[in-house]
Image: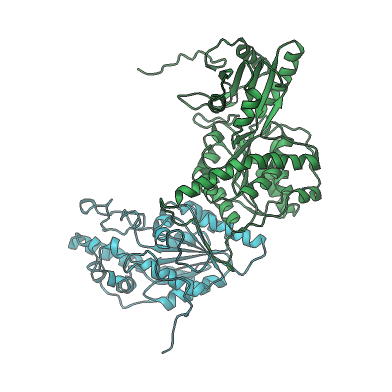
Chain colours: A cyan, B green
């Protein structure tokens, strides 16, 4: 059998992730792509805990834990130190959740990307504050239940488009990626590695605990997110959009119905979600078309 | 000016990474370093971050990766860093920072006061208060030496405007002599792809407690290292400061305790008063963390009356230096009477006449324990 993924494992078993954690798979693939010459910077997020507890660690690369809102700024410091020491062949990867990216870490991220720091910023997005027990973040999608958006007052705000925000900074490279498409994910991290300056990768990381789904549904949900256009796979290189997959669109209901966090939604709300997804997809197609001209 | 002395100190110490954000009255430090890095006069990476929070985060990243890191801030900027001051201390990173002492808002006030830095007392940073621009420059170089030995960061405090913006002659030592005094930073543990390690992982009650003890021990040990670093500095450059400065305290009946520029003004006042027959001396506290309790006991313990001038206030209690000084004197079998003075908040002038007045009040041995010196009657309404 021919392996389509690098064999090297830079993440070990024995981590403290929940069963079926999408964030764990994301890290494993990311490190397969980047290799051992990589320094990882992790702010407060699920990975703070699941990485291991002193004196244990599950990563075989250097890892700096840092404060919640500092993934991008601490990474900037690491890069500066490497540059001053003449170590130009080391990757710096900031690895943050959606809370640390969309919310509390946004300012530092904006600053670092505006300065075009030479780093790869990965947001593994589980669409909420899952480490603290499932509270809404600005990444939580419309319609979802969390402990701070109970069913009577489910999430009404729309998820931010982080890739567009990054593109507005004239970032050299931004992309979405999925654990259900590891070859694509690894290709994107390899590409990020080859480009100088700031790189942003947005990985959807299904969270069985927070999404209220079975732990064996993680990959299936990640794939459905792509197939329903909930989370399209695309990349933006110097402002040029390329959609990597244009699926024959499945209805959003197939994706929503597997998750307890959407169990309460009426047909009306489900239809609304479908409309939003369709509008988002049309917008993305237009961006791709416009940026090619 | 003091801000330029700070920039030259960072340059001479060969800081490799500087991450800083401008704030009045620190701005000229950032500007000067920018110029020196741009011209190649200073070989460093200067990260022009979007906030002080990111400035300290970047210094943490750089220091963890093995680079000598420097930053400068003041007041609101220091407060914004607060979370990361704990981080730098807890991570045992020998970052050096100058903080220009400035009052905290509201109302907006850019003038001198020490409440900003004293509010960071328990973050695991050493704190040194300077009285001259020369001392600022020298202390940066000394602090890297001490910090890198004990693996704790140092905050060097200088008064807003009265040091930061005041021009005075500063001797800028020869780089080669500095290099012979301060070796390059080569930490045993750092982010290194050839020796991968995890820094700052989850730490349960099983070990967290012991790690706090290690920080405490390191800070206590820093006392002798600060003295040693000063001695060695003195041998090469002819200047030494110590944990405290004993200014004419021998057999003085009255001792005034102060820090920063109030202390340097007090020296003139004391010279005149001694000439006129008053038995008075000054104890200048230079190192606030680690706190020099033995030195305070030794120098001030035998005085009749001790007066502490605080350009800061711990609301609901008293001046911070006053509290700590009294605690140091408490276990002496016979201790002096101690009086606290709150003065100069928000940059209000503390003149030689004011200091003389506070010395006389102290010497009388008859005053309230704490005096808000020259407080105007503003018709204060406490509660309804």
In terms of image quadrants, where is residue B325? top right
The residue positioned farthest toward the front in the image shown: B333
Asked whether, in this view, residue B273 is left or right of residue B305, the answer is right
Give x and y (percent) for residue A130.
34, 57
Residue B4 visible in the picture: no
**A266 left or right of B66?**
left
Q: Residue B328 location, x and y as percent?
A: 56, 27
Corner quadrant of residue A22: bottom left
Above or below, A209 against B148 in this view is: below
Q: Nearer the viewer, residue B251 or A103?
A: B251
Instruction: State the quadrant of the N terminus of chain B.
Output: top right
Front-lying residue, A233 or B175: B175
Q: Residue at x 57, y 61 (%)?
A: B191
How many numbered circles does the render carry? 0
**In this picture, is A164 found above or below B323?**
below
- Residue shown at the point (77%, 48%) measured from the top left: B178
Q: Is residue B376 above or below residue B192?
A: above
* Residue B60, x across and y down, in percent: 56, 52
- Position of residue B36 in the picture relative to residue B365 (left or right): right
Q: Is residue B61 visible?
A: yes
Say which quadrant the C terminus of chain B sits in: top left
- x, y percent for residue B49: 57, 50
């Amino acid at each position: 059998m021919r392996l389509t993924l690098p064999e090297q494992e830079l993440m070990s078993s024995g981590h403290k992730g929940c069963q079926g954690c999408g964030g764990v798979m994301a890290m494993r693939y990311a490190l397969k792509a980047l290799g051992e010459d990589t320094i990882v910077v992790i702010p407060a997020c699920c990975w703070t805990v699941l990485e291991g507890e002193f004196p244990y660690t599950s990563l075989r690369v250097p890892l700096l834990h840092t404060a919640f809102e500092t993934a991008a700024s601490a990474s900037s410091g690491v890069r500066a130190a490497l540059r001053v020491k003449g170590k130009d062949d080391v990757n710096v990867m900031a690895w943050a959740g959606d809370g640390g990216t969309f919310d509390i870490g946004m300012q530092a991220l904006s600053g670092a990307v505006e300065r075009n720091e030479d780093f790869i910023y990965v947001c593994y997005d589980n669409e909420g504050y899952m480490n603290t027990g499932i509270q809404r973040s600005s990444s939580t999608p419309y319609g979802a239940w969390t402990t701070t958006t109970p069913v009577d007052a489910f999430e009404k705000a729309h998820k931010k488009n982080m890739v567009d925000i990054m593109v507005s900074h004239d970032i050299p490279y931004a992309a979405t990626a999925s654990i259900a498409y590891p070859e694509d994910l690894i290709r994107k991290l390899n590409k990020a590695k080859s480009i100088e300056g700031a790189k942003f990768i947005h990985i959807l990381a299904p969270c069985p605990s927070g999404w209220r789904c079975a732990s064996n549904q993680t990959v299936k949900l990640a794939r459905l997110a792509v197939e329903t256009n909930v989370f399209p796979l695309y990349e933006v290189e110097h402002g040029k959009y390329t959609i990597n997959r244009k699926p024959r669109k499945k209805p959003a209901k197939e994706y929503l119905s597997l998750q307890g966090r959407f169990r309460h939604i009426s047909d009306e709300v489900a239809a609304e979600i479908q409309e939003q997804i369709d509008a988002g997809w049309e917008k993305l197609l237009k961006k791709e078309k416009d940026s090619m001209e | 000016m003091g801000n330029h002395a700070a920039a030259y100190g960072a340059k001479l110490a060969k800081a490799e990474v500087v991450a800083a954000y401008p704030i009045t009255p620190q701005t000229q430090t950032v500007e000067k370093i920018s110029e020196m890095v741009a011209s190649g006069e200073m070989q460093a990476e200067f990260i022009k971050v979007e906030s002080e929070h990111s400035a300290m985060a970047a210094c943490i990243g750089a220091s963890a990766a093995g680079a000598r890191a420097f930053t400068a801030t003041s007041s609101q900027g220091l407060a914004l860093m607060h979370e990361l001051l704990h981080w730098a201390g807890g991570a045992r990173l020998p970052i050096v920072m100058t903080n220009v002492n400035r009052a905290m808002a509201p109302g907006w006030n850019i003038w001198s006061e020490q409440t900003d830095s004293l509010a960071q007392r328990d973050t695991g940073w050493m704190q040194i208060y300077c009285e001259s621009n020369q001392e600022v420059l020298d202390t940066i170089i000394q602090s890297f030496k001490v910090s890198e030995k004990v693996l704790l960061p140092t905050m060097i405090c200088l008064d807003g405007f009265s040091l930061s913006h005041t021009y005075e002659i500063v001797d800028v030592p020869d780089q080669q002599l500095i290099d012979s005094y301060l070796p390059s930073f080569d930490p045993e543990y750092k982010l290194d792809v050839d020796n991968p390690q995890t820094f700052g992982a989850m730490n349960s009650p099983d070990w967290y407690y012991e790690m706090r003890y290690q920080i405490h021990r390191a800070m206590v040990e820093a006392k002798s290292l600060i003295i040693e670093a000063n001695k060695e500095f003195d041998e090469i450059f002819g200047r030494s400061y110590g944990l405290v400065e004993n200014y004419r305290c021998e057999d003085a009946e009255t001792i005034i305790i102060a820090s920063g520029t109030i202390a340097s003004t007090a020296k003139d006042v004391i010279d005149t008063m001694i000439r006129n027959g008053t038995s008075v001396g000054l104890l200048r506290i230079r190192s606030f963390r680690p706190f020099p309790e033995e030195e305070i006991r030794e120098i001030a313990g035998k005085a009749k009356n001790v007066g502490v001038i605080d350009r800061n206030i711990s609301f609901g209690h008293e001046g911070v230096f006053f509290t700590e000084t009294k605690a140091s004197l408490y276990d002496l079998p016979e201790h002096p009477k101690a009086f606290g003075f709150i003065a100069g908040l928000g940059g209000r002038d503390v003149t030689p006449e004011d200091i003389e007045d506070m010395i006389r009040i102290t010497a009388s041995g008859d005053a309230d324990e704490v005096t808000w010196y020259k407080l105007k009657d503003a018709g204060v309404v406490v509660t309804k």
